[in-house]
């Protein structure tokens, strides 16, 4: 009977941590479906932050990570990793609530969308040389700053949602 309990615990662990296990190299790369293993991205984090900001602005309440995972069709590990990275940067805070609720870490007027995206768009290369690719990245960074450089979550939550507009 204990074997069944232990086997169940092991299976549950593998199912919930498949991304970590895959990254450690324990899954056969030929059997691994790369699309099934989600990774945090700047755009995804920006959407998570918008959901948290919207919940806080409209209901003065935090957003639970399981609700975020279900709403955006993400794995709980991806949501947790994204929120942890944003928490380290002071963008969100974990509130005392049932089920780990998250709230903005600063006033929404002080949190820029580009700040969230930059957290996940880091170049991890050590000592990259000055070349044409570096120039392309610099141009992309400048263009991003020009388009969304000053856009804050206060501006995004103040605008009406498409589902709230009434068509006549």
Image (cartoon, rainbow, N blue to C red):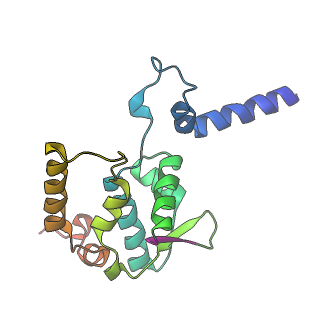
Q: Is residue 12 left or right of residue 33?
A: right
Stretch in magenta: 90-94
Where, by quadrant of the figure, is residue 149 drawn? bottom left
Residue 136 in percent (x, y) is at: 14, 49
Return the residue found at the far top: 30
Residue 139 in percent (x, y) is at: 13, 55
Residue 113 in percent (x, y) is at: 29, 67
Residue 160 in percent (x, y) is at: 23, 73
**With respect to residue 156, does 79 lie above or below?**
above
Which sits in the foreground, 83 or 5?
A: 83
Q: Residue at x 37, y 72 (%)?
A: 54
| Label tally | 0
**With respect to residue 141, does 93 lie above or below?**
below
Which sits in the foreground, 3 or 41?
A: 41
**With respect to residue 8, does 151 lie above or below?**
below
Q: Magenta stretch containing residue 104, yes or no?
A: no
**With respect to residue 39, does 165 lie above or below?**
below
Which sits in the foreground, 156 or 161?
A: 156
Q: Is residue 99 left or right of residue 8?
A: left
Q: Residue at x 19, y 58 (%)?
A: 141
Q: Residue at x 59, y 39 (%)?
A: 17
Q: Main secondary structure of the magenta part?
A: strand
Quadrant assignment for the N terminus: top right
Q: Residue at x 30, y 78 (%)?
A: 154
Quadrant assignment for the C terminus: bottom left
């Amino acid at each position: 009977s204990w074997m069944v309990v232990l086997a169940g615990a092991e299976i549950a662990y593998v199912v919930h941590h498949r991304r970590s296990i895959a990254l450690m190299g324990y899954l056969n790369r030929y059997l691994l479906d790369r699309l099934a293993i989600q990774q945090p991205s700047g755009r995804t984090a920006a959407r998570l932050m918008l959901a948290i900001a919207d919940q806080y602005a409209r209901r003065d309440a935090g957003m639970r990570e399981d609700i975020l995972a279900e709403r955006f069709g993400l794995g709980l590990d991806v949501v947790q990793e994204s929120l942890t990275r944003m928490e380290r940067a002071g963008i969100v805070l974990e509130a005392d609530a049932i089920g780990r609720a998250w709230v903005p870490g600063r006033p929404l007027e002080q949190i820029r969308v580009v700040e969230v995206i930059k957290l996940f768009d880091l170049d991890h290369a050590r000592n990259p040389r000055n070349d044409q690719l570096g120039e392309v990245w610099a141009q992309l960074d400048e263009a991003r700053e020009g388009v969304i450089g000053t856009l804050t979550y206060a501006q995004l939550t103040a605008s009406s949602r498409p589902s709230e507009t009434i068509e006549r």
